Image: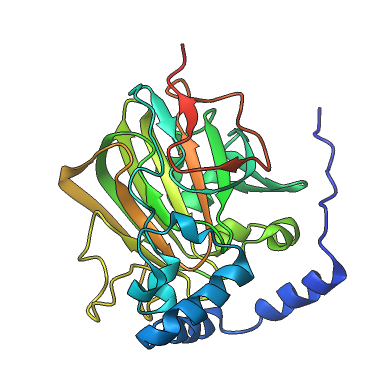
Amino acid sequence: MSVPAVTPELPSAKWRVILSVLRRVPQGGLSRGFGRVADIEIPRALRPRVLGLFAGAVGIDLTEAELPLTEYRTINEFFVRRLRAGLRSWPADPNTAASPVDGIVGQLGRIGSGELLQAKGRRYTAASLLDDAEEARRYDGGFFMTIYLSPRHYHRIHTPTAGEVAVARHVPGALLPVNAAAVQHMDNLFVRNERLITYVDGALGRVAIVAIGAYNVGRISAAYDRDWSGADGVGWVTNRRGVQAETRRYQPARPVKLGAEIMAFHLGSTVVLLFEPHRAELLSAMEPDLEVQVGQPMARVPL
């Protein structure tokens, strides 16, 4: 019996035009240009005004920031600000996985026949997302969750479960927007874009944490591997000229505590989580459009 086709939902005509244009421009070069602007040091006396206007424009809650505005030298430093100590909590149960980011849940559900749901009428494969067909097979029949980080959100990524990082992979690609309009309109959006994939082996099996780059800077850094930044030493893995796809294997594996910082977005993006079958199941409270915070329980070992 064939599965009926589902007509995709389309964004507004305005956004379709914008996305069509962005597909035709050099996203990497433009994003690196935005990055240079974001790295311009702001005079200390002007920081409260400049950063305050930026925070107000995108809706950032300044009460959550670790430091006063005068301590952030650039827009990029402010964007990757840490949270005030004690602001988030983590589950005590080692068999529970928590959200690695603050954000908004997009699609979630079971991975069937190697496919994940991007949006109504649009699917993509785990093999394409991970750029590794063999690794993707372990997740068939398991669960996935997509979390979108808007500009107002905290942009550091933490470990959803205690464990160790034995392997990670960087896949160069485009830097298209990943907002709701782009997710609705562009086939295979997440597998087109540049991404940094970190695997954490722990009580819930091997959890794949896929950090997806996006337009406007598009940098992702890896806290567990500070040397993974190329000869120019820029400090991030993605959106660098001339790099090829690369897998890094760590022997011995690098231990990570529950809630440890493992990656960070330097402006923008989305995280896709993959869980192995029979090793983890999503909590019933998880649903599309739910606002989640770092440390919020999201999955657990099946009972």
Residue 274, position as x, y percentages in the image? 48, 39
Seen at 54% across and 67% down, the residue is 214
Work out which residue is located at the far top of the displayed protein and give it. 303
**Image height check: is 152 above or below 231?**
above
Q: How is the image coloured?
A: rainbow
Residue 201, position as x, y percentages in the image? 30, 35
Tell whether 109 sits left or right of 241.
right
Location of residue 145 by image quarter: top right
Tell whether 103 sits left or right of 123.
left
The foreground one among 81 and 280 is 81
**Image height check: is 215 above or below 292?**
below
Residue 181, position as x, y percentages in the image? 73, 62
Work out which residue is located at the far left of the displayed protein and give it. 252
**Image height check: is 221 above or below 49?**
above
Tell whether 230 sits left or right of 3.
left
Residue 108 seen from this side = yes
Tell whether 41 sits left or right of 120.
left
**Image height check: is 228 above or below 52?**
above
Seen at 62% across and 84% down, the residue is 25
Tell me how many marks there are.
0
Seen at 77% across and 47% down, the residue is 121
Seen at 55% across and 79% down, the residue is 27
Looking at the rendered image, the quarter that the N terminus falls into is top right
Residue 40 seen from this side = no
